Amino acid sequence: MSGEFVKLDKDNFDLLRKQIYRMCGLTISEGKGYLIEHRFKPLYQARNCRSWRDFYQLLLSGDVQFKEDAISAISTHETSFFRDNHPFVSIRNKILPELLKNRKAGAKIRIWCAASSTGQEPYSLSMLIHEWVRSLPGVKIRPSDFSILATDISGAVIERAQEGLFTNHEKSRGLPAGYDKYFEKSEGRWKVSPSVKSIVSFKKFNLLNSFRPLGQFDFVMCRNVLIYFDDATKVDIVHRIHDMLPDKGFLMLGSTETLAGHTDRFATEHMGAVLLYRKVRWTK
């Protein structure tokens, strides 16, 4: 039997938003009690909570699965293939050629897609790499020379992404003409081809944790996630990304995100309608 749902009062709203911040760094602003109610209602009822204080106590408990479910519920998973399009044009025309030019002999080109949701972004990038490599006759570069790590804070979302299965609506949303060849029909859905999946790996990861276990990257995509953090957390994440990039390595943020006034560790480069951030040397 589901728990009886009650409205969220201000005291419990404050407790919950502070705990959300501690768990995953997301900032829930004043007046957003309705958001917590909406996102947490199914979990509240499924766990037979009698009050929001019960819900809060579960977040403080050792119930790892409950915390995982809560983080997944409060996180935004909006995504699509080739989202916003312009960034992918910049990647093809500017970033991929530079990554190839700066590549060390025999080394893989490593790319990190942070907050990758259900996988459309890293799979889009893999498809783009396949298309770009095909357009370079005579150049000794293969898709397998690239490695894409895709991470998200939600284990459930990562599991979905690893399956690589999408509905008709999900596949058609944003997918450019000519890219259907990278999908196969599978039990009423569309499965990403093995070649596209072969250079993408997925990992559950919280951006508040140390980046050191992830290693170094040549290019980081961290799109449409920093907007959910406060300024201090945003700057901390960006500075730690700086540490994992080579000199002049690229960082790409979402179209509404900016580093202006926050850090001097990246130089801004305009590529059409897209802002790219290139690492600059910085000493303490």
Image (spheres, helix red, strand yellow):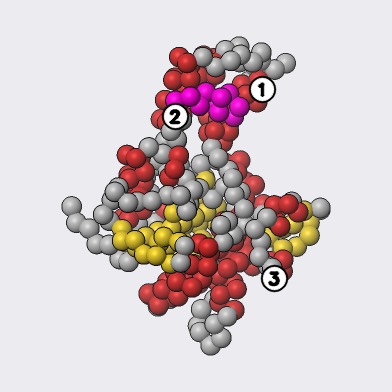
Q: Secondary structure at mark 2?
A: loop
Q: Could you tell me if residue 13 is visible in this image? A: yes
Left or right: residue 236 versus residue 113 is left
Give the labeled residue for mark 3.
178
Image quadrant in which you'd find residue 14: top left
Q: Which residue type does callout 3 highlight?
A: Gly
Instruction: Identify the residue at horizontal 31%, vertical 61% (top origin).
Output: 267
Instruction: Identify the residue at horizontal 65%, vertical 26% (top origin).
Output: 42
Q: Which residue type does callout 2 highlight?
A: Ser
The image's mark for residue 29 is 2
Do callouts 3 and 2 mark residues in contact (Cβ within 8 Å)?
no
Identify which residue, 71 or 214, lies in the foreground. Answer: 71
Earlier sequence position, callout 1 versus callout 2: 2
Give the labeled residue for mark 1.
46
Q: Mark 1 against mark 2, which lies toward the viewer?
A: 2
Q: Is residue 67 magenta?
A: no
Residue lying farthest right? 187
Image quadrant in which you'd find residue 48: top right
Residue 7 in percent (x, y) is at 58, 15
Q: Secondary structure at mark 1?
A: helix
Residues in magenta, as a range: 29-39
Q: Residues within 10 Å of mark 2 (few under 14, many from 20)?
A: few
Residue lying farthest left? 284
Q: Mark 3 against mark 2, which lies toward the viewer?
A: 2
Earlier sequence position, callout 1 versus callout 3: 1
Residue 145 in percent (x, y) is at 50, 72
Q: Main secondary structure of the magenta part?
A: helix
Work out whether 257 lies above or below 42. below
